[in-house]
Image (cartoon, grey):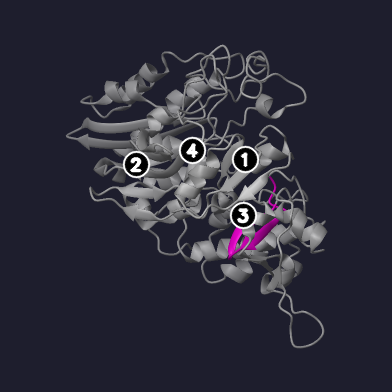
Amino acid sequence: MKPFTYARPADAEDALRRGAAAGARYLGGGTNLVDLMRETIERPGALIDVTGLPGAIEETADGGLLLGAAARNTAVAEHRAVRARYPVLARAIVAGASPQIRNMATVAGNLLQRTRCVYFYDHAGSRCNKRVPGHGCDAIDGFNRESAILGTSPACVATHPSDMCVALAALDAVVHTRSAGGGRTVPLTGLHRLPGDHPEIETVLQPGELVTAVELPPLPLAARSTYRKVRDRASYAFALVSVAAALQVDGGAVRDVRLALGGVATKPWRAWRAEEALRGRPASAESFRAAADAELADARPLPGNGFKIELARRTITAVLGELAGGGA
Amino acid sequence: MPISVNGSAVEPPQDPRVSLLDFLRERLQLHGTKKGCDQGACGACTVLADGERILSCLALAVQYDGHAVTTVEGLAMTGAGEAGVLHPLQQAFIDHDGFQCGYCTPGQICSAVGMAAEARRGVPSHVTADLSAEEIALSRDELRERMSGNLCRCGAHNGIVAAITEVYAAEAVR
């Protein structure tokens, strides 16, 4: 590990001042960053430990929730209001990593975790455009069973690994940040960039910009929501396909729906097209399948991951069927 | 502010690169906590920080300045006599053959102590059907899911589940 300095800022202003230095990185639970530093994939010169900054979970004036950036993943999953009003978020969090890791990992750290693409980690033996911009991508012609089918580019096919972010994408969550120039909000669906020609730039955050909270707007239909994760083993594995969904059915028709996908895309994937295809349609297996088809029409499979298209189609159909109360 | 390790105040390392795991083993000579994968995949290095189970391999020791860390050594209560008294879970692991080589055992035991506290306060798991439950009954499925962050390559899982069940789920299961 490359030497670095370590500081615990007293408040956000102190953190921003320290975070402005070249080579500085904010440190949450460390569950991803410390590992990447040990592998020398990340080489910050200064770590600014922001776990002492606000991590409370509070009600907002309009009936939503504000998750402090430093809230641990477990704290979010076990929060009474999250469990009751946003069950998809609690279920997504407990589908991820292990209990020990969820006790360490923070909300903001989860947002900014990096891909687990094996070529990103294999720094001694392969090419990766995220690790070395312009170097090339060995996943495209290599082991790509776990790679993305949506949002890919000729430069990168790495999936975003988070479960929590998939639920946040479905819930219209809003990320609050601060910079030296002041604060701003970014919709979760606009936080992560598609890889394009620059897969090394993963979010719209500027250097030194600090995530302070994630806001969940009031969303009554989320009371009927869930998360399903398909993976190679029963627990403690990244998703091959995951689905976060909330569904409101009225008189047999889909009145409103939220749908997002994990494990298949280069960013937490809000399924806008599927939602559009569903609103006002009968809440039937046929509609659910058609909506899945609409979302997956642009999927670009690689030799190793074509199975994800059918797996995603079936998982979307099954989850929506479960929420509709049928056996679809 | 020092780190409290098993009740003793110790100064954190000067070098922030030192993981909590290496700090415990190499600096404090607390060899109970084991280094398995050193990348957060196996759970052998599990310790308790302020009562919550964490992976000491992914933790920098300096991050725990001002916090209380408990290792497997700290779970064994120092009894009245010369010999320490085992934690009930340690005794249960012995009684139920909850290990073979023993390498994952300290992590399993620390993890189970933290796990029991999580279940008591209603933290849901991937297999929890009712998210509104105030307290989680540790069925075999719940227990296995909640311990899935601790791998055992000897395959002593049946004994591990039996030991944890005896101590923490006696009234809830069966």
Give amino acid for label 4.
Leu
Report the quarter where the N terminus of chain A lies. Answer: top right
Helix or strand or loop: what does disc 3 sit on? loop
Whether residue B102 can be seen here: no
Report whether mark 4 lies on the same chain as mark 2.
Answer: yes
Q: Label 4, on which residue?
A: A111
- Where's residue B12, x and y in %? 70, 60
Question: Does the magenta portion include B52?
Answer: yes
Mark-to-mark CA distance, 2 and 1: 31 Å
Tell me the CA gap for discs 1 and 4: 12 Å
Q: Residues within 10 Å of mark 2 (few under 14, many from 20)?
A: many
- Inspect the image, locate mark 3, and give the three-letter code of the amino acid beneath it: Met
The chain identifier of the residue carrying mark 1 reads A
Q: Which disc number belongs to residue A225?
A: 2
**Residue at mark 3:** B147
**Label placed on residue A10:** none
Name of the residue lying farthest toward the left: A251
- Callout 4 crowding tier (Cα within 10 Å): few <14, some 14–19, many ≥20: many
- What is the chain letter for disc 4? A
Residue nearest the viewer, comparing B87 with A199 = A199
* Of residues A296 and B68, the one drawn nearer to the viewer in this rendering: B68
Q: SS at mark 4?
A: helix
Residue span colored magenta? B41-56
> Viewer-nearest of labels 2 and 1?
1
Which-is-in-front pick, marks 4 and 3?
4
CA–CA distance in space, label 3 to label 2: 26 Å
- Distance CA(mark 4)–CA(mark 3): 25 Å
Residue A33, disc = 1
